[in-house]
Image (cartoon, rainbow, N blue to C red):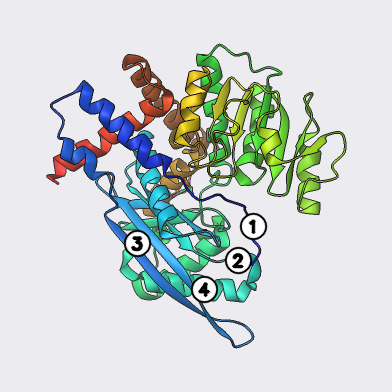
Amino acid sequence: MSTTLSKPAASDSVTRYTIQAIDQMKSMDSGRDPDLLRAILKPKCEITLEVPLRRDDGKFVSFQGYRVQHNDARGPYKGGLRFHPAVDIHEARILAHLMSLKTAVVNIPFGGSKGGIAVDPKQLTLRELERLTRTFTSMLGDNIGPLVDIPAPDVNTNAQIMAWIVDEYAKKHGHSYGVVTGKPLELGGSLGRDEATGRGVMIAVREAAAEKKMNLKGARVLFQGFGNVSSFGARLIEQELGAKVVGVSSSQGAIYNKNGFDLSGAEAYYRKNKGLKGFAGVEWMTNDELLVQECDVLIPGALENAITMSNAGKIKASIVVEAANDCTEAEADAVLKERGIFVIPDILANAGGVVVSYFEWVQNFSSHYWEIARVRSELERTMVAAYNQVSSTAKERQLSMRMGAYTVAIERIVRAMALRGM
Ligand code: GLU
């Protein structure tokens, strides 16, 4: 079975960062309940399903499906569903944990969850994909719902898949758009959801550059990736910040030119050829080579564990903005810190998507739909408030931005748990 995204096994840096943040919080404030702090390391519920599928040719197959519900002290569980052969319970557990931290750091009233099916959707026909999605939804039953757990698109899932979930869920529970976010506009989706993660990344780059007094006009920005997040992010960084994108990549390889290239030309080429190889006026290289090229800002926006001990010492950027989840291994993070590289962690940098998911959910409840200008201005306000909160916590306690973000998030979750009497 071919994979759509090569992905090394998760190293569980997320748990290690959480333990590091908890240890630091315990040393600062002896009054905090250490058992409650540690309780957030464990997910509250894990669901494993064997999802059957009758293929178009009549053959019967089945795939493993997962949903890990990590923490719901601050609100219903929230997080994406991915369809990828490498999906497993371990990965879902790590990413659900990350979602609890992400929703807390941007202060939206959700907990964290994650899941998916261990399948390569490119090996299925559209009808098979629909049947598999519907069976998975029906097997999840009451474990998802607008006030229970709200899935969203993630790797290899999209608005069409969310539409099938809405329809299948409605058969047993009645009409309810709020069961998932990232829906098509015709079925209760929100304007601006598609660009939201990329726009949030652009805001994080802008705020980080201002803090580090980096002039972004003409600054060189390198993206790993060129999917939804990176393509919107790259475009907005050029248009709104005046910086120059010098590199992007797909799973087959990367393009780089230290003076930049025609970004919209590269996008059109990528869409037409399903890859970047052969695009004119750039060097062609591997994803690993791309990460260590000359640039001012590096944005890993594709793979988990992109920054490892093999490249952390060679990265040239002075700012790293993590657009992909779980993209820096804990040991490599320590190297970046030692080298004085300013890292904006994933739970802050890529939270724009789930923030607009929250706006979509709010719009579904009120059945009143916002104009794009309102979505953008509320996203701007939410991201800047979160950035400022993380930055001031990091400065006050002399922490990295990652530890600042983890501290803000864990404190919010633990306060909610304590108030509930858990
Ligand atoms: N899958 C996205 C993430 O990892 C969005 C999740 C959501 O909108 O619920 O943040």
* In this rendering, the label closer to the viewer, 4 or 1: 1
Q: Nearer the viewer, residue 161 or 413?
A: 413
Q: Please report whichever mark, 4 or 3, sits nearer to the chain's N-terminal start.
A: 4
Label 2, ligand 1: CB separation under 8 Å: no
- Secondary structure state at the residue bearing disc 1: loop
Does residue 378 appear in this view? no
- Return the x and y of residue 113 as percentages of the image width and height: 37, 52
Q: Mark 4 sits on what residue?
A: 132
In whole angstroms, how far apart are the C-alphas of marks 4 and 3? Answer: 19 Å
- Return the x and y of residue 76 as percentages of the image width and height: 31, 52
Disc 2 packing (10 Å; few <14; some 14–19; many ≥20): some
Q: Please report whichever mark, 1 or 2, sits nearer to the chain's N-terminal start.
A: 1
Label 4, ligand 1: CB separation under 8 Å: no
Instruction: Give the residue drawn at x 68%, y 19%.
Output: 219
Q: Amino acid at mark 1?
A: Thr
Q: Please report whichever mark, 1 or 3, sits nearer to the chain's N-terminal start.
A: 1
